[in-house]
Amino acid sequence: SSGSLTRIGALAFKGARNTVSSLIFGRSSLPVLVEIGFNAFESFAGLLLFVDSPFPKLQSLGQNAFRQASLERSTSALEIINHTSIQFVGSRSFDGFGGTVKVMGAMPSLRLIRNHAFQDTNRESVIEIHTLISLEDIEPSAFSGSQATVRFSGPAPRLKLDQIDSFVE
């Protein structure tokens, strides 16, 4: 049962090319998920939906986790909303994801957004997060080429703003 899944491992679905494939995680389907490993869904060709589901224990999104996934499936969607336990968004986690990415709400445990994490996300995507009291760094080019709506608000007392190119190509 997906309800007891704690980790989606590295390379788990990387390169699965069948466009008829689908992975759908809906309401309350991953209550104990802690980690999505590096390259877990990279280049996955099918429909990928992480929607309407809290992941109350999710701490880490690995490098390339959803990179170039669902390129021909614009109906794919990743929603990470009010996930207060997330600490780390890996390099190129959402780079070029073919569907919509929504990362929204309070993220008081988030410490780091790695380089190119949201690169080339589409215009339907929204990254709107607040209560960033643990955020220490947004690495260079984290939002390079992104067409997403991006809004950060609220306190971020630990954030170092020495990388002026985090939002540029």
Image (cartoon, rainbow, N blue to C red):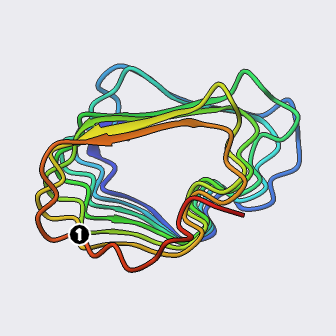
> Where is residue 122 drawn, in percent x and y?
71, 36
Vertical placement of 131 versus 6: above or below?
A: above
Q: Nearer the viewer, residue 18 or 47?
A: 47
Q: Is residue 1 visible?
A: no
In the image, what residue type sits under mark 1? Leu
- Check disc 1 and report the residue beneath it: 159
Number of residue marks: 1
> Where is residue 1 drawn, in percent x and y?
37, 37
Q: From the viewer's perspective, tell me whether residue 86 is left or right of residue 97.
A: left
Vertical placement of 86 versus 113: above or below?
A: above
Q: Nearer the viewer, residue 39 or 159?
A: 159
In which quadrant of the rendered image does the C terminus lie? bottom right
Vertical placement of 152 versus 162: above or below?
A: above
Q: Which of 65 and 103 is in front in this view?
A: 103
Q: From the viewer's perspective, tell me whether residue 44 is left or right of residue 58.
A: right
Q: Is residue 20 visible?
A: yes
Q: Please name the residue shown 22% across and 47% down the image.
A: 32
> Where is residue 146 drawn, in percent x and y?
67, 48
Secondary structure beneath label 1: loop
Q: Nearer the viewer, residue 13 or 90?
A: 90
Q: From the viewer's perspective, tell me whether residue 130 is left or right of residue 165.
A: left
Mark 1, residues whose alpha carbon is within 10 Å: few (<14), some, or many (≥20)? some
Q: From the viewer's perspective, tell me whether residue 151 is left or right of residue 32.
A: right
Q: Please name the residue shown 46% across and 75% down the image.
A: 139
Q: Please name the residue shown 21% across and 47% down the image.
A: 107
> Where is residue 40 drawn, in percent x and y?
59, 61
